[in-house]
Image: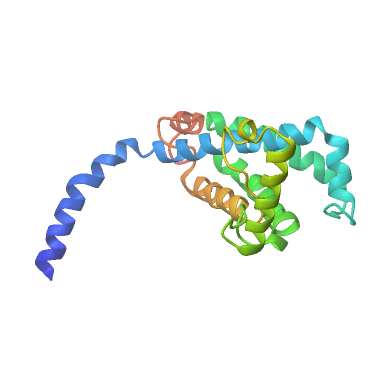
Amino acid sequence: MNAIAGWYYSIHNAIFPRLQQADGLAPLALRLYLVPVFWMAGTNKIANIDSTIEWFGNPDWGLGLPAPELMAYLAAYTEAIGALLLLIGLATRWVAIPLMITMLVAIFAVHWPNGWAAIADSGAQDIAVRLGAAKDILREHGNYNWLTAKGNFVILNNGIEFAVTYLIMLLVLLFTGGGRYVSVDYYLSRLAPAGR
């Protein structure tokens, strides 16, 4: 058993320490993945701020959040400015915190009642019946081939899956930062005096 462990670690140690010089690529990939997600969410809220405030505050068909105007502006600008900061890797750890808070609010205020899946299971009997009916209507009254040329129809379940995924990605950035060589944070840290 010791021989196997020694063999395993000799191969492991020959390969993985060499990856250290490229360890900034993983945080960069996370940042670049999250940029359009938060940019679109934030700028859409800003462009429709009155509707966003109404949705945040309405207890009947919206979220029923307290101080909806404040919450709408905070969420919108956190997402939009956060996307820009993630893009350049500036204040990555700091911006991850309010973005994680927006994801927690989204998880519990918006998506939680819908379960895990973002997209409904098309194999489930009731979902398959609904999709079949929608396809029949589109074939009869619409241009079904054009509508499906870029992909299949799905039923949005709107569960917590995507929000939790973004939350986990932000948690990783909170611990790793923006990444070596590929973030403004990295170069600013090199300018800071040692020990501070």
Q: Residue furthest front?
A: 140
Q: Is residue 90 visible?
A: no
In the displayed structure, does residue 120 sit left or right of residue 137?
Answer: left
In the displayed structure, does residue 102 sit left or right of residue 36?
Answer: right
Spot occupied by residue 183 in the image (x, y as percentages of width and height): 48, 31
Q: Is residue 30 visible?
A: yes
Q: Relative to 128, is 79 above or below?
A: above
Spot occupied by residue 166 in the image (x, y as percentages of width and height): 58, 48
Residue name at image x 81 percent, y 46 percent: 71
Give the number of callouts: 0
Spot occupied by residue 176 in the image (x, y as percentages of width and height): 46, 45
Residue name at image x 75 percent, y 57 percent: 109
Viewer-proximal residue, 78 or 136? 136
In the displayed structure, does residue 47 sit left or right of residue 86?
Answer: right
The answer to which quarter of the image holds residue 50 is top right
Viewer-proximal residue, 58 or 67? 58
Q: Residue furthest bottom?
A: 1
The answer to which quarter of the image holds residue 99 is top right
Spot occupied by residue 171 in the image (x, y as percentages of width and height): 54, 51
The answer to which quarter of the image holds residue 78 is top right
Quarter holding the N terminus? bottom left
Residue name at image x 57 percent, y 33 percent: 150
Q: Relative to 60, is 97 above or below?
A: above
Viewer-proximal residue, 168 or 18? 168
Q: How is the image coloured?
A: rainbow
Residue name at image x 89 percent, y 44 percent: 54
Q: Relative to 23, is 172 above or below?
A: below
